[in-house]
Image (tube, grey):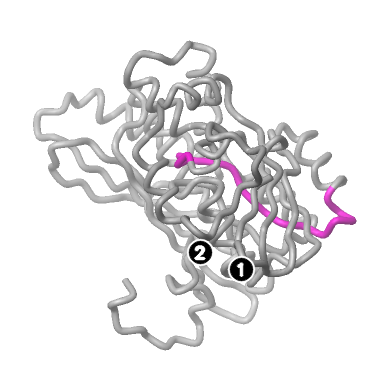
Amino acid sequence: MCQLEPIDDPNLIVGFDSSDDAAVYKISDEESIIQTVDLFPPIVDNPETYGAIAAANALSDVYAMGGTPKLALNILCIPADMDKELVSGILHGGNQKVNEAGAVICGGHTIKDNEPKYGLSVTGFIKTSEVVTNSGARPGDVLILTKPIGTGILSTAMKSALLGDESYNAMAASMMSLNGTASRIMKQFAASGCTDITGFGLAGHAYEMAKGSGTSIIINSRKVPILPQAEELASYGILPSGTHSNRRWLCGNVDFSDEVSLTTQDLMFDPQTSGGLLFTVKESLADSCLRALITNGVQAAEIGYVDESQTSAVKII
């Protein structure tokens, strides 16, 4: 998109130039709209679970900006001969998740394709003064992650029938979980910056946050929550191709201390689907914020801190 001619609109608060999670457009001094879109092919076999995961993933971009999703449009690609019950299951799963978010699906668009793909275009609202971006992190802030990582590794293992039931259930539950509660609490504690963890992995999205805010981010890998079986599978080399792509892309921008194993490094690069929020708060508020998250059922952890800009944008220890 860098090849596109830029459009100067003073009401566009957040556009694609900042690698943020969604666009934000000011409609008045008091209120702005948030716009995002996301879709992907099936990540699990159950159609309703797939639909719910895809919807939760799309809604997450609005939550990452601190907003409230309100309207959604289905985007569906389906083979011409796909069973209608399967199609209905996907849409039903997505609709249930959108309803859980307090939003409404009001239409959509469908095209024929060789492979199913599903997602949403989502519109949310936020007070203009409360927009949270991925470029607001400040030195001294504490870094909080609200979901465990490892979905890329687990979903890859599932395709080869190497995933146990417990691990599958934990993975599916995590991906279907909305980030709404985490978003509400991070705003209560005046989060300075936020992003959600998706395809670029924890290291990649931390890099975008550091780059956008002109800081360096220090992550303690031992504090990062990991889904069951993900570390074991990674140690066997069961990794999605996106792990290697993320490692190549981030070469020179992410530094690991000597004691961080190759398996742990792979986990940091693991591309996530419908991952948690990664946000920063003042150190004085971090403990209270973490308690509020955990009390409200969020699998959150304090995983590091923000530092002054250093040679590497991200340091993982």
Mark 2: give few (<14), some (14-19) or many (20+) Cα within 10 Å.
many
x then y, percent, for residue 215: 67, 68
The span shown in magenta is 270-286
Q: Quadrant of residue 30?
A: bottom right
Q: CA distance from mark 2 to mark 1?
A: 8 Å
Q: Quadrant of residue 296?
A: top right
Residue designated by label 2: 20
The numbered mark, 2 or 1, whose residue comes first in the sequence reads 2
**Relative to 136, is 235 on the left or the right?**
left
Quarter in which the N terminus is drawn: bottom left
* Residue lying at 36% horizontally and 25% vertically, measured from the top left: 44
Residue designated by label 1: 135
Q: Is residue 249 shown in magenta? A: no
Q: Is residue 277 shown in magenta? A: yes
Q: Secondary structure at mark 1?
A: loop
* Residue lying at 63% horizontally and 73% vertically, measured from the top left: 128
Q: How many marks?
A: 2
Q: Residue furthest right?
A: 284
Visible residue check, residue 67: yes
